[in-house]
Amino acid sequence: MKPVALTFDDGPSRWTPLVLDLLREHEARATFFVIGARVRERPDDVRRIVAEGHELGSHTLTHPRLTEISDDEVRAEITGGLEAIEEVLAERPTLFRAPGFYAERRELAIVEELGLEAVFAHVDPQDWRPERDSHTIFRLVLDELREGVIVDLHDGYPPRPTSSRTDCTPTVEALDHLLPCLQPEGYEAVTVSQLGTPAAP
């Protein structure tokens, strides 16, 4: 089987349990990049993610654009996200994804300094756009699937002032169509760590 990594950003949210239900139904594994502030709102979802064999990564504390804030603010956002997860699980993740993939040399140096591995993506259907319906998301992902790719999806939406949709139902519906297609096409959904090398910027 050809491994691919499905990843989900901006949760946990009320759509996270629906995503987890689908992953469990199809015996698929995924990696969730969670926002620290949301972790504190929905700790049970975080516990379930790990209990069901999925991987957890940090997505900062409040989802700012890291390239637009100071070094100290970048560190505070990253460590704040890690601490929120640690409060729930008593351990910190080693994977990190910058909101919107906005991480250049300066930000990546801080990520490395903090002992984290930055994860990007090869397939980005931009499912956070309000105009993206489930069929479009499904086709954009399926058409670009290749062995070893990391796919970026969303099981939540970022807090203000980030502009995004406020309903993740299209992604859940797209996932419901996508997961049954993986095995017949020779793919296996694994975590980012199981995949091996994270996608470079």
Image (cartoon, helix red, strand yellow):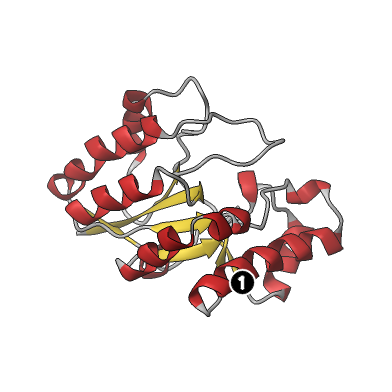
Name which residue lies at 50% across and 50% down.
11
Q: Residue furthest top?
A: 131
Nearest to the observer: residue 5 or residue 143: 5
Nearest to the observer: residue 133 or residue 122: 133
Is residue 133 depicted above or below 127 in this figure? above
Q: Is residue 114 left or right of residue 131?
A: right
Is residue 125 depicted above or below 48 in this figure? above
Name which residue lies at 85% across and 61% down.
71
Does the image show residue 69? Answer: yes
Residue on which the image places disc 1 = 116
Q: Is residue 109 left or right of residue 199?
A: right
Q: Percent position (x, y) of residue 151? A: 42, 47
Q: Is residue 35 left or right of residue 22?
A: right
Q: Amino acid at mark 1?
A: Leu
Please tell me how crowded label 1 is: few (under 14), some (14-19), or many (20+) other residues with Cα within 10 Å: many
Nearest to the observer: residue 39 or residue 2: 39
Name which residue lies at 38% across and 68% down.
50
Q: Percent position (x, y) of residue 146? A: 32, 47
The answer to which quarter of the image holds residue 163 is top right
Q: Is residue 153 left or right of residue 10?
A: left
